[in-house]
Amino acid sequence: MREAIPRAFIKSFGCQMNVYDSERMGDLAAEAGYSEAARAEDADLIVLNTCHIREHASEKIYSELGKLRRLKEERGRAGRRTMLVVAGCVAQAEGAEILRRQPAVDIVVGPQSYHRLPELLGEARLRPGIVDTDFPLEDKFSHLPATPPDAIRRRGASAFVTVQEGCDKFCSFCVVPYTRGAEASRPLGSVLGEIAHLAQAGVSEVTLIGQNVNAYHGLDDRGQPIGLAGLIRAAAAVPGIRRVRYTTSHPNDMSEDLIQAHRDVRALAPFLHLPVQSGSDAILKAMNRRHRAADYLDIVARVRAVRPDIALSSDFIVGYPGETGADFDETLALVRTVGFASAYAFKYSPRPGTPAADMPAQIGAAEKERRLAALQALIEDQRQAFNRASVGRRLEVLFEKPGKREGQIAGRSPYMQAVFAEGPKSLIGKLAEVEILAAEAHSLRGRVVSPAS
Ligand code: 5AD
Ligand code: SF4
């Protein structure tokens, strides 16, 4: 009797880098003979690619694992074995503790060693309960199989490409320097090779991702140092690539060269996600951000001078230890001064092992909640104002998927706004000019005015 093809289900939590890593683990699973399962219930291999950035994110993993243990037991009673893998930043931070809290887990693998997944699966079949959270010297990327063209097409016309990982900034609230390790850039040739491979399979938009992407540093083909701006120029020159984005950046790495790229590189989308975290200099200092609010405003002014229409986005933390009402008002004032197209606000969440977790003057839950609501309301007003200002304009939209209603297709404007329009499915994967008719609650509604270019 022939064995059925085993199936893998990979669930991603957290940031875009986890989405990218999950796709690459999917490529590894495919190479190891697994086909994709749409639900955990049908899978012989289940991977949770986890996030540790805030407390509720990591607690969610343990409740998910509790459910998966029961699923694994049920499948076991039906004679089917399920391999349960915890990957990502919770795996890195908690290691063997995960096996202690949930013994049904077969493998714990960190973000720098997941290229070893096929070997680990072989070992864990004989001896479950493996932990691999090394930061190996070998380059993970050179051990990953190229994504097959049909998988690229299934994932769509817009793709993430990791160009840099880790962080040396050590903001005092953040676990990333501990879970993702020291800042390291991928060689230029490896990144451009991946982008060319994606473009050949129909990808037209790439988002260059890194925890500190604008700290990217590589060498060009003459051996000269090259930063993110140089990488953006090179990515934009790859045949088939029509749009380039990058995320996430740190204010202190916004070089003049990168700002100029927003003027010169036509394919570089007019969107910048630049986290500032707080508008108060006292809090920025306590956070070890190493810049002041005025430095941030100066960068914003310089970027707007070269690209006046740029859409700005940011991250904020409210209720950082010691944050007074006056500090918080300075955050609101910064938001009013900048005028964001979108932004994320989070309540401060103490992370074990980070300096801020042990600071005195932790802020109470109710006050954090109040500040979060006030900041989110202001951000929402700005988002809606930005979207309303697009009504009547013609924007180039990259259509990515069918819309919610029959006959609709959905995509993104250069400014990252979600746009939907009536149109044929044949436009999916293509760029088209769209006249914006209305700003709805979460997206823009438009009319396709010119066929795909
Ligand atoms: N508490 C709350 N928010 C956090 N972030 C990072 N660490 C914490 C924390 N301990 C937020 C920052 C960062 C975003 C990815 O997550 O705003 O930019
Ligand atoms: Fe974390 Fe970003 Fe600060 Fe690095 S720069 S420590 S990733 S918040």
Image (cartoon, rainbow, N blue to C red):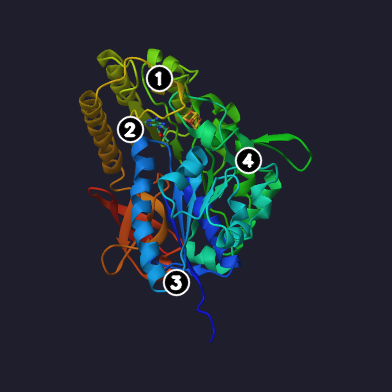
**Residue 206 can be seen in this image:** no
Q: Return the residue found at the far right.
A: 222
- Which of marks 4 and 2 precedes in the sequence? 4
Left or right of 431: which side holds 31? right
Q: Residues within 10 Å of mark 1 (few under 14, many from 20)?
A: few
- Which of marks 1 and 3 precedes in the sequence? 3
Q: Amino acid at mark 3?
A: Arg
Secondary structure at numbered mark 2: strand
Q: Is mark 2 within 8 Å of ligand 1?
A: yes
- Which of marks 4 and 3 precedes in the sequence? 3
Residue beneath the point at 30% across and 56% down: 446
Give how far apart the Cα atoms at labels 3 and 4 are: 33 Å
**Residue 259, quarter of the rendered image:** top right
The front one of 323 and 410 is: 323
Give how far apart the Cα atoms at labels 2 and 4 are: 29 Å
> Which of pointers 3 and 2 indicates the residue nearer the eye?
3
The front one of 352 and 369 is: 352
In the rendered structure, find residue 80 and report the number of the disc placed on it.
Answer: 3
Give how far apart the Cα atoms at labels 2 and 1 are: 19 Å
Residue at the spot of label 2: 346
- Which of marks 2 and 3 precedes in the sequence? 3
Give how far apart the Cα atoms at labels 3 and 2 are: 42 Å
Q: Residues within 10 Å of mark 4 (few under 14, many from 20)?
A: some
> Which of pointers 3 and 1 indicates the residue nearer the eye?
3
Residue at the spot of label 1: 358
Q: Circles 3 and 4: CB distance less than 8 Å? A: no
Q: Circles 4 and 1: CB distance less than 8 Å? A: no
- Which of marks 1 and 4 precedes in the sequence? 4
Residue at the spot of label 4: 135
- Which of marks 1 and 2 precedes in the sequence? 2
Q: Amino acid at mark 1?
A: Asp
